[in-house]
Image (tube, coloured by chain):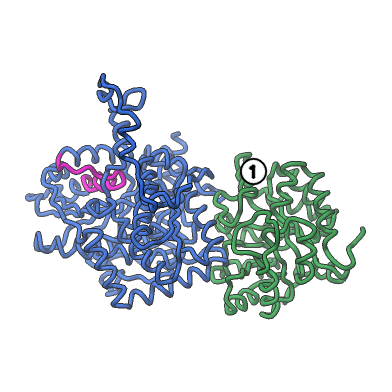
Chain colours: A blue, B green
Amino acid sequence: MAVLWLLEKLNYQLNRTVRLMVDAPTADSQENAADAFLQGGASLRNAPGPYFGSYGGRWMPESLIAALDEVEDTFEKAKADPEFLAQLKDLNKNYSGRPSLLTEAKRFSQHAGGARIFLKREDLNHTGSHKINNVLGQALLAKRMGKTRVIAETGAGQHGVASATAAALLGLECVVYMGAEDCRRQALNVARMQLLGATVVPVTNGSQTLKDAINDALRDWVSNVDNTHYLLGTAAGAHPFPAMVRFFHEVIGEEARAQILEQTGKLPDAVCACIGGGSNAIGIFHSFLDDASVKIYGFEAGGDGVETGRHAAAITLGRPGVLHGARSYLMQDEDGQTIESHSISAGLDYPSVGPEHSYLADIGRVTYEPITDTEAMDAFRLLCRTEGIIPAIESSHALAGAIKVGKQLTQGKENPADTIIIVNLSGRGDKDVETAAAWFDMLDEDGNVKGTTLSTRKPKGPAERSNLEISTDEAGKDQN
Amino acid sequence: MTEQMTSKSAAAIDRAKAQGRAALIGYLPAGYPDVQSSIDAGIAMARNGADLIEIGIPYSDPVMDGAVIQAATTEAIANGFRVSSVFDVVAGITAATDAAVLVMTYWNPVMRMGVDEFSRRLAEAGGAGLITPDLIPDEAAEWFAASDKYGLDRVFLVAPSSTPERLAMTVEASRGFVYAVSIMGVTGARQSVSSAAEKVVADTHAAGAERVCVGLGVSTADHVREIAAYADGVIVGTALVAAIRDGGVDAVAQLTKNLSAGLGRATAQA
């Protein structure tokens, strides 16, 4: 283990060095590189792709290039079409419930060195996470392209639920690929998708998690591209997905920036988000990229600890490679085989990361650090008990990171409350109750919540239960 | 098509053409079930009618492959397959036969080793070039340089969905032959060959390709016969992988012999 740790550490240092040599503009350090960028007047916002520095691109089978071109063309036209933008804005407001709140977490702040922590409440969106922003945009594009079917991959199930929701709303057939291991971890979300009329396909290839779900979704897409849009759920993959998914999530940062100015009269000192593929993060970061005074942090899943090898910290410990259509930081072995990632959070359990993040890491504009399962779960419990908000375990990584950043930025400061930090609370933790209950030792050996099996009444019979069954034709339509 | 240097693949296809028939290209993954079996099976294909041999590198995320090839390559990796073994397989087959030996690989393993280093070692092993299912010419600058430096063939794919502009660009970028995907889908045996295949081949020829070979879903002598009527070569993969899985090297030899019977007017008896 010690040797492994040393090797990983060496690899990490090498990465940092190589990164600066290869990709960064000439500068002495990462921070100087970003400063040079910002002071030079070049904007980091609205990067159109396909390349972000040396990342991104289209490392894809030729069979799918025409479909990617069609998506790109449709997206570029829609982006400039006031009718499309109005339609999206209306759905965001009257369906998702935007703008989402910016809530000051006063009691939680006391644990972060006294910095004022504000939560961007994406957990309050319809379907419980930021994912709805992207799926509504892409589902509208699918309609514009005349597609009748959408497919999606999902890790935690949040994107699958959001996709099934958008498909139901817009009358599209929906098939969701989900790793069999993730189906087990997130059984409730599987049921949710089925209730919404989607077909969930458990994927038993490879690690049976998110990356394998994406592989199967790509296989489906190449076979059914005539009538099908691949509703990719994160800011990764082949062009135009990274730039397009970011575009649909930029609303998070736009709202947060206006809200913090309104509530505090100034820009924040730092913005924190969790990173799996990185869509919630790029969405909130985008509005602050050109604000040189705002420090930006992305927190990757450190799993059992990066020194154990069981983690999902692609930027911290990966090296550039291609997976799922983009060149980006990638967890890979010396043969270029993808290494299975590990995280308590299904939504962060991905061995690569969106290409724009790789670029922002290289130029030093965003600082990326790993957060372990334990740190994330400590922050999860803390937010529950100080603010009455149950966060998604994914978002708990950002909370744990914010605690560290808060302590760091307030160190030696006379008035720590002058320091302002925004955390993107990307999702709510309802889906994670079982995982959290197991983590905090709340279950008995049969997996029941302790103290919930004492009733001596006879369980209710089938006659009473049948009232709960769904009887509309629509609901059962797509299930075999 | 770039033809300024000698292409081993083109030469092999032209030898078949001189015999009045299309070429047969047989695919098997390296290291399945082990490295020596891959060499033996490659030799068996070459001795039973395959003009070109395509050796796949097992990869963790093979998005263009169906269930049979996925299962085989996953098993090869689980058995400890290392990417550098592919050069042993190529060298083993080229030492024993006249067949042109190409490597089929997803791009990340090549990037990881270094495109130049990979190309140097492939050329040293006697390999003809690379078939690259997830590398399009648009992203292939490094591969252009290395393949020119080491005299390797660049086999890019075209599909029923390729636009005329992309067909022309891909034909221009390719050397050896152009790989026409017969159907919108992934590898795997199918009942019949898609009617889209003939049109893709005609369009690719019209775009200037001298040699166009068809793959995906080709598994029987009848399929081979049908495609050999309009294409310069026929590529069989999944059926051969199933053969080595179920019957070992002997089954591969037998199936190759059966498939080659479908090749055309003057089927070689040798």
Where residue A370 appears, x then y in whole percent?
33, 46
**Residue under circle 1?**
B76
The residue shown at (49%, 49%) is A212
Is A400 included in the stretch rendered in magenta? yes
Q: Secondary structure at mark 1?
A: helix
Per the picture, the main secondary structure of the magenta-coloured stretch is helix
B179 with respect to A443 (left or right): right
Going by the picture, which residue comes out furthest to the front?
A: A463
Quarter that holds the N terminus of chain B: bottom right
**Crowd rating for badge 1 (residues with CA inside 10 Å; few <14, some 14–19, many 20+):** many
Where residue A314 appears, x then y in whole percent?
41, 50
Where, by quadrant of the figure, is residue A110 drawn? top left
- Residue closer to the observer: A262 or A93: A93
Report the magenta residues as a range: A386-404
Task: In the rendered view, tell whether residue B60 sits above or below residue A234.
Answer: above
The residue shown at (21%, 61%) is A98
- Label 1 is found on which chain of the structure? B
A315 with respect to A249 (left or right): right
- Residue closer to the observer: A348 or B128: A348
Q: Is residue A404 visible?
A: yes
Where, by quadrant of the figure, is residue A181 drawn? top left
Q: Which amino acid does the dot numbered 1 rest on?
A: Ala
- Residue closer to the observer: A363 or A422: A422
Going by the picture, which residue comes out furthest to the left?
A: A414
Is A183 included in the stretch rendered in magenta? no
B243 with respect to A402 (left or right): right
